[in-house]
Amino acid sequence: MKDNWRISDRVMQIKKSAIHEMTRLSKEMKDVAFLSWAKPTSDTPEHIKEAAISAIKKGLVGGYSVSSGLLELREEIVKKLKRDNDMNVNVSEILVTVGAVEGLSAAIMALIDPGDEVILPSPTYSTHIRQVIIASGKPILVPTIEGEGFILDIEGIKKAITPRTKAIMYCSPSNPTGTVFAEEQLRQLAEIALEHNLMVITDEAYEYFVYDNHEHFSIASIPEMRKNVVSCFTFTKTYAMTGWRIGYLHADEELIPQITKAHIPFAICAPLVSQYAALAALKGPSDCVVKFRNKYLSARNLMCKHLDDLSSVFEYKKPGGSYLMFPKILLKEGETDSTTFCKKLLREAKVSTTPGIAFGPTGEGHLRLSFCVSEEMINKAFDRMETYFK
Ligand SMILES: Cc1ncc(COP(=O)(O)O)c(C=O)c1O
């Protein structure tokens, strides 16, 4: 009998999250400069909170909605996808989910059979790797090209395709690298998917946070790809609504009932109070999104300036999107890996980051820094690092 006879092999394969480990260690210390979470530190805008309070007071939120989500919300999502993502879609193609993460999980459960391979350009959001494992699929990590800013390695992806390949899954803008995959590369990826009959699963959580000359491109806007894509979105990042647990996905009309079969056993429906809040977010003013974006942009610039002063310790690519960056550690003698480096940095300089290995083997030798924090926090973290590495 195996030692952990109560626990499934699926779950046993999943390693403890490095982000949670860094959080746990940080909590044991006082006054840590914390750059470990990809979580907006701003509060949800007032008009969204007010709409939720009003829905509660009207007695609208005590029940379930239909599993696919409130019709009025899905209608607003359709307008948003048309306006901002160039996707001409119907209400019957939308499923409201418990954040992007539950949508991604439900999509994978609906698409992947045990042993199916899913190609993930890496380093990538560690949850994606876990989602494939939980579905008894096989994550195939294909390194991105770091020298060109962690762009897709199209040839590498082609080479990784086998008869068991079922899907390609990516996030753009990327967690952890901040790379925005260019439209041209995503069109090449679409050609590969069509040629080999593969599904593409996208995580577009950071769609509104792109900078400089970068533009977010939704691969589902390519008409030929309509049957081959599940696109996952969220309110978490755009409207600082992490704890509301609300997102949505788009897939073609035949796929939605199948994905819904996977959605129901985990969620029944997305939280109803959060659906009303999301409705207010889409119908209300969008200046809050612009404000968040501008805040992250100046935080990015500040962090890059600090990193320039630490060029003997880190080498970095300026991220074109998200609020994350992924500098390479110029390891010194005796320093072996990102986990040891990050733990030492926490213990000795009181700065919490995330070891790159958390994002797959290609992330080793890096650390992830979040700039969705106040400028004071960034200055504090870098003042400490500048003293520490002097
Ligand atoms: C790429 C990516 N996708 C999804 C999520 C989580 O999204 P949600 O809160 O909508 O489940 C995160 C959070 O860090 C993320 O970085």
Image: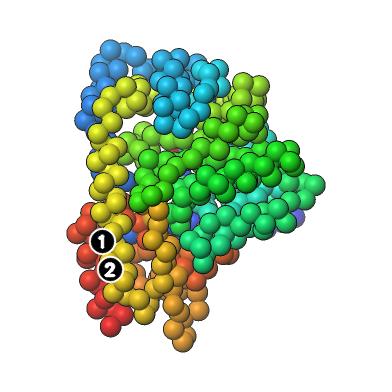
Q: Is residue 352 above or below residue 223?
A: below
Q: Residue 319 at what x, y percent from top left? A: 40, 57
Report if the CB atoms under discs 2 and 1 are less than 8 Å apart: yes
Left or right: 228 with respect to 220? right
Q: Residue furthest bottom?
A: 333
| Front residue of this view, candidates 377 and 290 | 290
For mark 1, does the 10 Å Cα neighbourhood hold few (<14), some (14 to 19), or many (20 or more) residues? some
- Please say if 281 is above or below 141: above
Residue depicted at x 28% and y 79%: 388
Q: Is mark 1 on a helix, strand or loop?
A: helix
Quadrant assignment for ligand 1: top left
Q: What residue type is labelled 1?
A: Leu
Kind of residue sitting beneath label 2: His
- Say which quadrant the C terminus sits in: bottom left
Q: In this view, does 358 lie above or below 232?
A: below
| Badge 2 residue CB within 8 Å of ligand 1 | no
The residue nearer to you, when weighing 212 against 45, is: 212
State which quarter of the image contains the N terminus. bottom right
Direction from residue 348 to residue 265 in the image, left or right: right
Point out residue 275 in the picture as x, y percentages from the top left corner: 39, 23
Is 136 placed above or below 246 here?
below
- The residue carrying mark 2 is 306
Instruction: Assign a secondary structure to mark 2.
Output: helix
What residue is shown at x 29% (from left), y 62% (from top)? 303
Q: Which mark is residue 302?
A: 1
